């Protein structure tokens, strides 16, 4: 299919169904990039409970990768949560269902794409759906349509938020239980479904949902009464930087994919990965608290990132402010100055090879002097304490939520002897502070056991060898935590 898209590039937008986390979406985007397919915009469809719970990380990935829209699929979502009858657009229950979805999407500066309205002839109620959606969407929205009238109605709709009241869908008849409603739906679906396509449209013009039909069949059959065995699960939150979603690395070669492969071979199920990014010490606990509320997390893998440490060590820090513009400040932590907000400016590895060698040396000298000035005024030890407080706060959150925590020490950064020296000191301090209190993993390596170099040419980002070693050094602690949950009596 991707080959046909490449050869006949006629699409502006492509819907990506069944997205359950940021990693799933990254894999799809990578598939397109590997086949050199460009110029298309993706619209991920979130249509499961797991996807809804992970919407924050999905929306964050979309924002970083310039994806404009996120769509909700209500039929598959209803099926996933075993709802019957389904919560359909047009009802007050549906409005309450999508409100948190819209809020999360708009926080990431995306636009909401509303699920299809199945009442093909109920024009008045479709207009109500549009008005309901406009009332909760501040950034505008898009609507999936199923008929020519619906398309024309959307085109002429300008978000007029009038107070006109439209009738609610008729509630189930009094006295009818779910089993009776399910039998009626089954009979209606099977009497109207076409043989070739399986599409079923009722006499009133309602497109009958195959997912709702399947739920009705389960509700009336013996399979519904049999309680299924609980599925094994292990949800992991990775709180770090770019490493878990690093570019130029296939999704299957990222370290957490390798870790999940270890777990799958050992325990016959694949853990769920949720990826979050922190750029400042102050912001990390709030990110984690929000993630814990939205997901049932079993394990936190916390990366001790070089960038927040190094930017705070410098005497003169350049950073990206909350308006996405370059800014700067002097780091005087000894006087109680706050850390630079948002994130550091891209590291100097972005300098192209064509840059004169003398200019590169001058930049290196100035950067090292900047670090040296920060060390003289005590920024190193002040930043040590900032990282220690952050990890302690995260550990307290983990204790409250009964989440196991793995702290992964800072990686090497061979592009600079000064940065290697500082990061080695940071690793030693973190290991001394937390080795006997938390599961701590030393990640300060330049080569693996076979002598293979772990970094790309920029000497900052891990290559495939680096991700393999990273997975290997974490795997012992990681697999023990899974074993502890799946086999509580094991030691």
Image: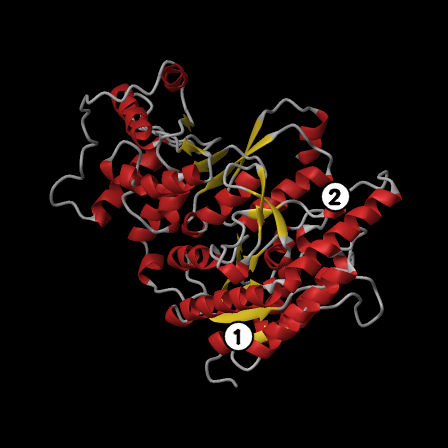
Q: Which residue is mark 2?
A: 350
Circle number at residue 481: 1
Query: At which x and y percent is residue 87?
Result: 29, 40
Q: Nearer the viewer, residue 295 or 204?
A: 295
Packing grade of label 2 (10 A; few <14, some 14-19, many >=20) is: few
Q: Residue at x 38, y 38 (%)?
A: 102
Query: At which x and y percent is residue 99?
Result: 32, 40
Image quarter of the N terminus? top right
Q: Is residue 439 visible?
A: yes
In the image, taking residue 286 as reference, residue 306 lies left or right, namely: right
Query: At which x and y percent is residue 133?
Result: 32, 30
Query: At which x and y percent is residue 97?
Result: 31, 42
In the image, taking residue 253 as reference, residue 229 lies left or right, namely: left
Q: Residue at x 19, y 23 (%)?
A: 163
Q: Nearer the viewer, residue 133 or 372?
A: 372
Packing grade of label 1 (10 A; few <14, some 14-19, many >=20) is: some
User: Would you identify the image quadrant in which residue 428 lies?
Assistant: bottom right
With respect to residue 454, does 403 lie above or below?
below
The secondary structure type at the circle numbered 1 is helix
The alpha-carbon separation of the residues under discs 1 and 2 comes to 39 Å
User: Would you identify the image quadrant in which residue 420 lies?
Assistant: bottom right
Number of numbered markers: 2
The secondary structure type at the circle numbered 2 is helix
């Amino acid at each position: 299919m991707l080959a046909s898209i490449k050869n006949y590039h006629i699409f502006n937008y492509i819907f990506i169904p069944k997205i359950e986390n940021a990693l799933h979406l990254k894999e799809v985007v990578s598939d397109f990039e590997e086949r050199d397919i460009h110029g298309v915009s993706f619209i991920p469809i979130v249509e499961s409970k797991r996807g809804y719970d992970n919407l924050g990380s999905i929306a964050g990935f979309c924002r970083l990768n310039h994806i404009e829209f996120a769509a909700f699929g209500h039929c598959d979502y209803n099926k996933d949560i075993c709802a019957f009858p389904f919560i359909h657009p047009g009802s007050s229950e549906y409005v309450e269902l999508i409100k948190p979805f819209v809020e999360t999407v708009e926080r990431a500066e995306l636009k909401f794409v509303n699920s299809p309205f199945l009442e093909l002839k109920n024009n008045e109620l479709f207009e109500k759906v549009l008005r309901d959606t406009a009332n909760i969407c501040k950034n505008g929205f898009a609507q999936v349509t199923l008929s020519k009238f619906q398309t024309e109605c959307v085109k002429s709709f300008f978000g007029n938020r009038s107070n006109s009241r439209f009738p609610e869908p008729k509630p189930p008849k009094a006295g009818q239980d779910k089993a009776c409603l399910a039998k009626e739906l089954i009979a209606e679906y099977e009497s109207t479904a076409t043989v070739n396509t399986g599409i079923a449209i009722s006499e009133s013009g309602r497109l009958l949902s195959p997912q709702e039909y399947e739920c009705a069949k389960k509700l009336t059959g013996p399979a519904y009464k049999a309680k299924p065995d609980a599925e094994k699960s292990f949800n992991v939150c990775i709180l770090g930087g770019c490493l878990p979603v690093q570019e130029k690395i296939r999704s299957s070669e990222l370290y957490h994919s390798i870790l999940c492969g270890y777990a799958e071979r050992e325990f016959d199920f694949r853990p769920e990965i949720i990826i979050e990014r922190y750029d400042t010490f102050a912001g990390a606990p709030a990110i984690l608290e929000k993630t814990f509320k939205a997901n049932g997390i079993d394990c936190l893998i916390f990366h001790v990132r070089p960038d927040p440490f190094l930017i705070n060590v410098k005497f003169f820090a350049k950073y990206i402010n909350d308006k996405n513009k370059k800014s700067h400040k002097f780091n005087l932590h000894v006087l109680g100055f706050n850390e630079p907000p948002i994130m550091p400016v891209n590291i100097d590895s972005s300098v192209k090879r064509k840059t004169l060698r003398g200019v590169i040396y001058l930049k290196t000298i100035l950067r090292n002097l900047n670090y040296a000035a920060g060390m003289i005024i005590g920024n190193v030890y002040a930043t040590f304490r900032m990282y220690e407080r952050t990890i302690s706060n995260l550990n307290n959150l983990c204790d409250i939520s009964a989440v196991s925590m793995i702290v992964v020490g800072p990686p090497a950064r061979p592009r600079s002897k000064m940065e290697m020296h500082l990061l080695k000191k940071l690793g030693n301090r973190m290991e001394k502070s937390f080795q006997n209190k938390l599961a701590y993993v030393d990640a300060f390596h330049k080569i693996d056991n076979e002598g293979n170099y772990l970094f790309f040419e920029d000497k900052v980002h891990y290559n495939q060898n680096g991700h393999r070693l990273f997975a290997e050094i974490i795997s012992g602690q990681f697999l023990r935590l899974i074993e502890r949950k799946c086999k509580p009596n094991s030691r």
